Amino acid sequence: MSTPPSPSAVARLAQQERSRREMLAMAAIGGAGAGAALLAAPGVAHAAQEKGMPPRGRGPAAYRLTVLGTTDSHGNVLDWDYFKDAVYADSAGNDVGLAKIATLVKAMREERGAENTLVLDAGDIIQGTPLAYYYAKVDPITGGSVHPMAKAMNAIGYDAAALGNHEFNYGIDTLRKFESQCSFPLLSANTVDWNTGAPAFRPYIIREFGAKNARSVKVGVLGLVTPGVAIWDKANVDGQLKFPGVVEQAKVYVPRLKAAGCDIVVVSCHSGPIPGSSYGDALPFPENASRQLAEEVADVDAILVGHAHLEVVEQLVDSKVTPGKQVLMTEPLKWGMRLSVMDLDLAFERGSWKVTAAHAHLLNSNTVPADPEVAALVRDDHAVVRTYVNSVIGTCTLAMSAETSRFEDTAAMDFINHVQADAVRTAITGTPDEALPVLSIAAPFNRDASIPAGNVTVRDVAGMYIYDNTLLGIRFTGAQVKDYLEFSAAYFKTVTGTGPYAPDDVTNAVSPATNTEIPDYNYDIMGGLDASLAYDIDIAKPVGQRITNLTYDGEAVDPAAQFVVAINNYRQSGGGGFPGVKAAPVVYNAQREIRQLLIDWVTDQGVIDPTTFTTFDWELVANGQPVTVEGAAEGGRH
């Protein structure tokens, strides 16, 4: 006979369980009674909720499957901001990183039973931080390194991850190497071979979970990615991979999962929950289709949503094809800030398992410490990358900040446009286009970006350009330049006077096409290299009639004039839906990363002197009079 545990051992176990439940209750955000059961005393809780059984169990043929989910981790393992070289901090008090997610996953597995728990990710894993960049470009995993995200996710024990669009940023070879380093499959039912249409990655997995007094529960997990990859990473996927629609491919594969005996279908979908597309009608398939997936595809039970960087605690979407059925959707924000907890309560009826209740809540990673095992796995990688981003590569004579770039002309944006335009000018020398004036566009991606006076490090420059975009040159007419600027000016809200206004009162207008605010990265500022491209944006006028006093080198821009425009690959391939860019002739495309161009330029020049490239080219006006925005420079430059 086994010896029963001593009273002191029982007390320790009870205290551990009580502490765990209190921690999880503190971390809980929203949902139906998200933390209530977790606060119960251990003995009472066990009586009411045996692991794998729904609360107040429905008899012997009942089972609870818990699906834990992350998304858009974007290279965040530790709670660290590499651009600031400090612990991550934001105004909402969020923490980031998979090391903290690991703590929450362990606690939930202990709470619900690891044997009753599925752990998924909804994509955008290997891009987004200097840590991710370093192991893609500086010491690439294709050369033998192991990706820190693979180390962390393997240690956590993910069951599967859907591909996100940013998985393709570094090319297919890097993605395949990352896939080989993961102990879990990367799923994408709508990433298919260019020629054959066959799946290029595993479309789905099937897992079985044991249940008392009935046969096991068979769960199918389907992975899907936004079709926008075809636009945003065209240079990496064209001729190799195609990306059919989310709904279209789900209608192919969900019936296959059901035919294979799956009782439950969970979709890990890297496609936002609010319908719409940043690329307009450039593709026949929408960018954000998770809601349509829930509404239009039969037999989907739950969707872990990614891509939109939104906090969606729980949405129960009415199916349009199965009357009375609701599909559970949740999205756990981004960067490891949240962990989604989906509870699917099942009953065994007429020989099969059915979902009787489905709810979700989120756990906030800022309530727990980092898991020491995961942190230790990437400690050396973290140190190497900190050294890299803090290395001095030059000096700057005047500080530059991007904080106000969304509403006033700044040296920071002029710096980006100067480097981009200079690279394109050099590239087209000796070509038929070498005599054309060169313009450049840049968006204020990062409000926190700045370059200090004095020593300048890699992270200072990299913070100016946080995306892994590459540079192209296209040919535009003067008329197309104006149309482009008019489209960009829709970013501003309409005003009636000259202010003063708070920045949020004039920026991030709601787009009628998407019914969401236009993000900073979809507002473009255009400048000239050898001469000034100047214009006013009259935000008292209707969208489409806002660009006034458009001149190049002091002369009104001729609609028939020819220009070469330096532009990033995201924009040129249709990202943001800007007019004219997709059909414009491409005069340069060496696939050079803009961020690295900026770093290389500073390294080569040694000194950044903003007075050599800064010009005051554009301003906000209302009925021709300058608009005052709080925080803007008073006749000076940032």
Image (tube, grey):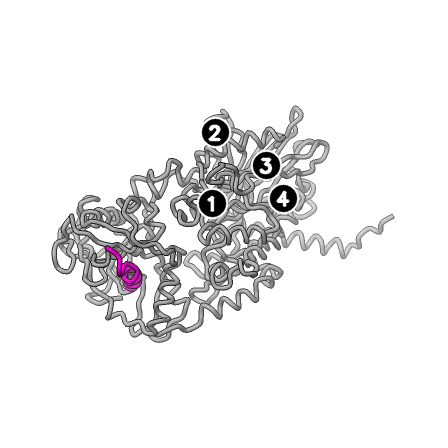
Q: Against 487, is 611 above or below?
A: below
Residue 116, x across and y down, in percent: 65, 42
| Mark 2 or 4, nearer chain start | 4
| Mark 2 or 3, nearer chain start | 3
- The numbered mark at residue 117 is 4
Q: Nearer the viewer, residue 415 or 343?
A: 415
Magenta segment range? 415-432
| Mark 1 or 3, nearer chain start | 3
Q: Secondary structure at mark 1?
A: loop
Q: Secondary structure at mark 2?
A: loop
- The numbered mark at residue 319 is 2
Task: Tell which tag, 1 or 4, sits nearer the viewer.
Answer: 1
| Mark 1 or 4, nearer chain start | 4
Q: Secondary structure at mark 4?
A: strand
Magenta-highlighted stretch: main secondary structure? helix
Task: Tell which tag, 1 or 2, sits nearer the viewer.
Answer: 1
Q: Is residue 350 left or right of residue 436?
A: right
Cα distance in 3D space between marks 1 and 3:
18 Å
Kindly check if marks 1 and 4 are in contact, taking CB atoms under 8 A apart as contact.
Answer: no
Residue 173, x across and y down, in percent: 50, 52
Badge 1 is on which residue? 306
Cα distance in 3D space between marks 2 and 3:
19 Å
- The numbered mark at residue 220 is 3
